[in-house]
């Protein structure tokens, strides 16, 4: 994990995570396109216009969390996907799931963190939605 503390590694990590999540979201969009699926509190009414890469860049810039939080956030998302197969990660929910998982990971991993309202603002959602 020492490599993750190197600030030069962070852009690579963000790019890698965004590539993984884009692939998952696109695959689930195609697979679930014609099937009725459950709607969760994480689903938006429309697809966000910001890319997953740009969204992760924004979270990285403003959340001030340790790099390991992004790895833990991905683990949370992976566990969510495995335990809730009826709620696949797709382009309508990936952004909200991301900001939520990073917030929870930060509160678990880091000694200093912001309140929910701050993360909601970073994520472009209301505090109530957070």
Image: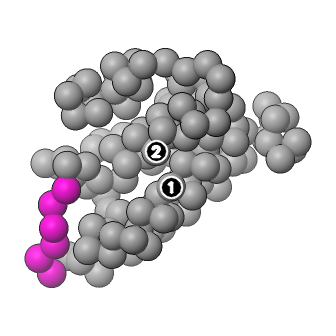
Determine the residue positioned at 64% across, 50% down. Answer: 71
- Which badge, 1 or 2, is on the more N-terminal residue? 1
Magenta range is: 34-40
Q: Is residue 17 magenta?
A: no
User: Do labels 1 and 2 touch, CB within 8 Å?
Assistant: yes
Q: Is residue 113 above or below residue 10?
A: above
Viewer-closest of 84 and 29? 84
Task: Identify the image quadrant of the C terminus.
Answer: top left
Residue 18, position in %: x, y? 54, 53
Q: Quick check: 102 left or right of 68?
A: left
**Magenta-highlighted stretch: main secondary structure?**
loop
Alpha-carbon neighbours of circle 2 within 10 Å: few (<14), some, or many (≥20)? Answer: many
Q: Nearer the viewer, residue 61 or 67?
A: 67
User: Mark 2 sits on what residue?
Assistant: 101
Judged from the image, the secondary structure of the residue bearing numbered disc 2 is helix
Residue on which the image places disc 1: 76
Q: Is residue 90 visible in this depiction of the protein?
A: yes
């Amino acid at each position: 994990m020492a490599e993750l503390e190197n600030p030069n590694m962070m852009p690579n990590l963000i790019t890698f995570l965004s590539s993984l999540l884009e692939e998952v979201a696109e695959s689930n969009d195609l697979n679930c396109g014609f099937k009725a699926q459950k709607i969760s509190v994480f689903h938006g009414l429309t697809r966000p216009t910001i890319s997953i890469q740009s969204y992760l860049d924004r979270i990285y810039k403003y959340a001030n969390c340790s790099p390991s939080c992004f790895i833990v956030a991905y683990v949370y998302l992976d566990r969510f996907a495995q335990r809730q197969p009826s709620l696949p990660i797709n382009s309508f929910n990936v952004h909200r799931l991301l900001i939520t998982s990073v917030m929870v990971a930060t509160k678990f991993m880091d000694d200093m963190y912001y309140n929910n309202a701050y993360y909601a603002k970073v994520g472009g959602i209301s505090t109530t939605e957070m």
